[in-house]
Every structure is written in C-alpha cells, then in structure tokens.
Image: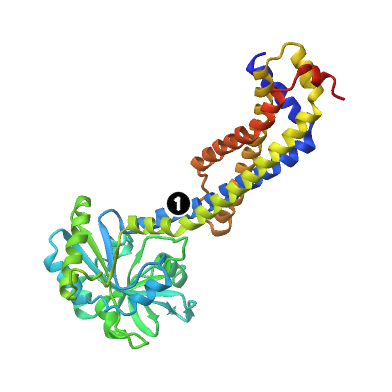
C-alpha cells in the first residue's frame, strides 16, 4: 500500500468521526491560537516601534537624565537623584568629542495651548526649546519657511516652527508664515512648519511648537514648577555611522569626568540609540512571549493527551477493521503509519486553524490602534512543527497498539 493510500485512509477515518475529531482539534486550536495571537500582537507593536524608533537615525544618539518610555518605576526613582544634564555639559561634548559633528539641545514641556485669531487648541501642544540641530538630529525636517537659527538663539527671538497638524489646525486656509500666534500666553511669530511626522504612540511631532532654546529658558527659567533644575536632552550626531560607538564612548568619558564619577561608579545619566530602544522593547516583552509560549505549550500537551486517549478509543472501535486489513495483507508498519498519520493530520489541521485564528486575534491590535498589520511567519512555521511533534509523540502509543493487534483476535472482536 502506498503512502498516498495510507494518507487517504487516515483522512477518511477523520472525516467519518467528525464529532470526535472536532473535540480533538479544539485543544490544539486553543494552544496554537494563544501562542500565535500573542506573538502576532507583539509583532504588530514591534514593527511600528522599529519604524518610529529610527527617528534618531544610524548616526545619532541621545543623552538625558530620564530613562525612555520602557523604563521601570525603579529606574525613574533612581534618576530623580541624579543631577540634571546641563547646557554646559552639551557644550563640553561639542568642544571635546572629536568623533561628533552635530550636538543639539532640547527642553520639553507639554500640555500647552496655542491660539490664533480667537481660536484656541486643546491643551495638547508640546513646546520644545531647542537648538537649530533639532531638525537634523530628529529627522524632522522643515516643510515651509525656515528653521530656527543661531541668530534667533543669540537674540532670544520669539519665533516658532509648528508641527504639521498644529499648523493646519491654527491656519486651515492661510499660509502661517509671518503670522503671530499665542503659545502658552506668549506671542510668537511663525517662521516655519515641519513635514508631517505622525506617531502611532502619541509622539509630539504633529503638535510640536519648536522655539529657540534661549527663548525657552528666558520664558520658563531653568527651574521647573516643582523646584527641580530643568534637564536638557542632548542629541549627538557622529561623523560617520562607523564612529557611533566611539562617539558614545567619548561622550560618556567627558560626562563622567565633568560629574566626578569614579571608575567603579555607574553612569548617572542615560544614553540611547534607535537600536538600543528596540532592544529594550524586545527585552520588556520577553516575559509576555515566554508566558504565551508556556501557556500554549501546556494547552498543546493537554490536547496531545486528549488525542492519545481518543485515538486509543478509536483503536478499540476499529479493532475488527484492523483485523480485516491485516488478513488482506496489510503489514504492521501500514497500520502504524495510518494511525500515526491520523494523529499528525489532526494536530496540523488544528494548527492551521489555530494559526489563522491567532493571526486574526493578534491583528486586532492593528485594527484598534491603527498600526500596520503583521504576520510572524516564523512563529507559524514553529507552530506547525510543534503540532507535528505533538501528533507523533502522542499518536505513537495508539498507533503501536493498533499495529500489534493479532488479526485472528481482531477479527473475532465484536
């Protein structure tokens, strides 16, 4: 008997016992869908994260007092004890780090209101008191008008560059360049607008108001409302991508020397690149991935035990059939192969349904959040391989039992 004939007989046996097969499939579907669903949801988020975290580019890194968005509460509490990153330290980086060519500084404040000609926005505007390097170091380029300049910085000019959405909201039918707006109660002249730069994670790019850093510190001071010294975010661009690691090492050395840190003391500032943020996201989601894998594995093992029990019942029910096949010349390996294929086909059929269901459930995240859909094919292949393993492992016992039946005893079975 050919392998194809054996396969068709196995498939026919599955079709003739729909209820039993359906109950067997349920556990497999549940296990695979739980793994694939979670991994797909994480893949959807990760894909968007990787797109957005390339904001710093391959040559830029950032130094700041506070950890980024994937930090723990413990890290933030520790950072509260650290000194602020200062403009003087940024200047020291410009003066002493030879592997960098662009150093920018930024002070941030959110929840502000912008108004023009009687219309006011919601309190959602993010003010950035930055330097002219903001645009290049954050890959957030000027669409119309001009960027803030060194002259604007030196003269403490009240000028502003608006994010695309903010400019469209305040000036839906008018070119904003040259008009004066009120930003948090202070008048500023609009000198430019940024290109659209939407953020799936609610970043400030579209509702940004960039003003000269000197104007920001003159208006708001170097102390925040809680009495703490404002800390600058310093964006640093290496001369070439190959010099990025050297630039980070030199910058750390300069800051550690200025801050008087001993060789055995940890840094009291954070630095990160686009790649390090992606790595940190992957690290933060690792427990979720492990949990989903463990839960799915347990579900598949339970389903495997169910398959074994149901297949043992099937052997008992089909004893006479097995006896007839053996009496007609079927060899032991033909019987074993048939029952083993039944178990594998059942598991993989459940695996396919579970994968499709898991992709659908996982991509609900994209429908809800607007993220791009994603299909982690590597997890689909792993899921199918695992299903085959479960089918072989738990299908082996009933298959061996069926193959060992004595044809005379089997034929006399009622």
Place of residue 77 in the rendered image (x, y in percent of width and height, measured from the top left): 38, 77
- Dividing the picture into quadrants, the one containing residue 230 is bottom left
| Residue 100 in view here | yes
Q: Nearer the viewer, residue 244 or 354?
A: 354
- Dividing the picture into quadrants, the one containing residue 279 is bottom left
The relative height of residue 330 versus residue 131 in the rendered view (above or below) is above
Q: Specify few, some or many for label 1: CA neighbours under 10 Å numbering under 14, 14-19, or 20 or more.
A: some
| Apparent side of residue 297 relative to residue 113 in the rendered image (left or right) | right
For the N terminus, which image quadrant? top right
Per the image, the residue denoted by label 1 is: 47
- Dividing the picture into quadrants, the one containing residue 193 is bottom left
* Residue at the (17%, 76%) spot, across then down: 260
Looking at the rendered structure, the number of numbered marks drawn on it comes to: 1
* Residue at the (15%, 67%) spot, across then down: 94
Place of residue 285 in the rendered image (x, y in percent of width and height, measured from the top left): 47, 57
Place of residue 19 in the rendered image (x, y in percent of width and height, measured from the top left): 79, 38
Place of residue 402 in the rendered image (x, y in percent of width and height, measured from the top left): 72, 25
For the C terminus, which image quadrant? top right
| Residue 15 in view here | no
Q: Nearer the viewer, residue 221 or 45?
A: 45
The relative height of residue 293 versus residue 236 in the rendered view (above or below) is above
Q: Give the farthest residue toward the right.
A: 414
* Residue at the (72%, 11%) spot, across then down: 329
| Apparent side of residue 180 relative to residue 407 in the rendered image (left or right) | left
Q: Nearer the viewer, residue 8 or 92?
A: 8
| Apparent side of residue 286 relative to residue 100 in the rendered image (left or right) | right
* Residue at the (12%, 66%) spot, across then down: 96
């Amino acid at each position: 008997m050919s392998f194809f004939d054996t396969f068709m007989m196995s498939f026919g046996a599955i079709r003739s016992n729909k209820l039993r097969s359906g109950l067997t499939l349920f556990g497999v579907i549940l296990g695979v869908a739980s793994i694939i669903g979670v991994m797909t949801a994480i893949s959807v988020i990760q894909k968007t994260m990787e797109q957005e975290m390339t904001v710093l580019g391959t040559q830029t890194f950032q130094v700041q007092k506070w950890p980024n968005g994937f930090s723990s509460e413990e890290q933030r509490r520790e950072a509260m004890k650290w000194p602020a990153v200062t403009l003087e330290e940024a200047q020291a980086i410009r003066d002493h780090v030879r592997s960098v060519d662009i150093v920018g500084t930024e002070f941030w404040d959110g929840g502000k209101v912008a108004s023009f000609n009687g219309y006011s926005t919601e309190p959602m505007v993010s003010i950035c008191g930055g330097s002219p390097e903001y645009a290049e170091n954050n890959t957030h380029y000027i669409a119309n008008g001009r960027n803030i300049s060194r002259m604007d910085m030196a003269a403490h000019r009240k000028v502003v560059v608006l994010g695309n959405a903010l400019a469209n909201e305040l000036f839906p039918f008018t070119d904003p360049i040259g008009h004066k707006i009120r930003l948090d109660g202070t008048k500023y002249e609009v000198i430019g607008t940024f290109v659209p730069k939407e953020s799936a994670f609610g970043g400030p790019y579209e509702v940004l108001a960039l003003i000269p850093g000197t104007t920001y510190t003159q208006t708001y001071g170097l102390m925040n409302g809680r009495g703490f010294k404002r800390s600058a975010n310093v964006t640093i661009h290496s001369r070439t991508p190959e010099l990025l690691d050297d630039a980070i090492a030199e910058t750390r050395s300069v800051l550690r020397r200025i801050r008087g840190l001993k060789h055995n003391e940890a840094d009291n500032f954070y630095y990160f690149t686009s790649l390090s943020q992606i790595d940190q996201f992957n690290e933060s989601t690792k427990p979720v991935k492990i949990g989903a894998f463990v839960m799915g594995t347990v579900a598949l093992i339970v389903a495997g035990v169910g398959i074994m029990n149901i297949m043992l019942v099937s052997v008992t029910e089909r004893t006479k059939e097995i006896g007839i096949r053996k009496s007609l010349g079927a060899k032991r390996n033909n019987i074993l192969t048939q029952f083993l294929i039944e178990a594998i086909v059942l598991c993989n059929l459940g695996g396919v349904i579970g994968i499709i269901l898991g992709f659908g459930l996982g991509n609900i995240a994209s429908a809800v959040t607007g993220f791009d859909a994603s299909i982690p094919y590597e997890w689909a292949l792993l899921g199918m391989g695992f299903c085959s393993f479960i089918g072989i492992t738990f299908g082996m016992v009933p298959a061996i039992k069926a193959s060992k039946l004595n044809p005379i005893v089997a034929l006399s079975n009622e």
